[in-house]
Image (tube, rainbow, N blue to C red):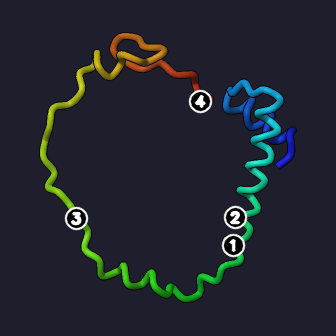
Amino acid sequence: MDRITVEEVAKLARLRLTSEEVESLASELTKIGDYIGQLSAVSTDSPGAIGASLNAQTNTREDEPSASSSIESALRNAPRKEQGFFLTRQVVE
């Protein structure tokens, strides 16, 4: 991944990155992309050993009602709140 793409993604994510961080992330993301390319070359036509997990039993627990968080507790760390609700930027026009 090139430096410009990393800077654009950082801008969209509202991250402030130093020049060194941008270079490091570009290198790391390139390696991740290369690894994903290697994975896409793996044949997935036959499930092989993964088929054995189809008979595995999942440990589950019963659903039990429990106390909910209070409004004050839920909103405690909210950056913006009003009248007991979270405030966010408008995302749909």
Q: Position of residue 40 (x, y in %)?
A: 69, 72
Mark 4 closeness class: few <14, some 14–19, many ≥20 residues within 10 Å? few
Q: Residues within 10 Å of mark 3 (few under 14, many from 20)?
A: few
Count of marks placed on residues? 4
Q: Residue 65, image x and y in percent?
A: 13, 42
Point out the frontmost of discs 4 and 3.
3
Left or right, residue 93 beside residue 38: left
- Real-space Cα distance between discs 2 and 1? 6 Å
Q: Which residue is mark 1?
A: 40
- Distance between mark 2 and mark 4 Cα atoms: 32 Å
Labelled disc at residue 25:
none
| Amino acid residing under circle 2 | Ile
Q: Secondary structure at mark 3?
A: loop
CB-based contact (under 8 Å), mark 2 and mark 4: no
The residue labelled by disc 3 is 59
Q: Earlier in the sequence, mark 2 or mark 3?
A: 2
Mark 1 and mark 3 lie on one chain; the one further toward the N terminus is 1
Q: Residue at x 38, y 18 (%)?
A: 85
Label 2, on which residue?
36
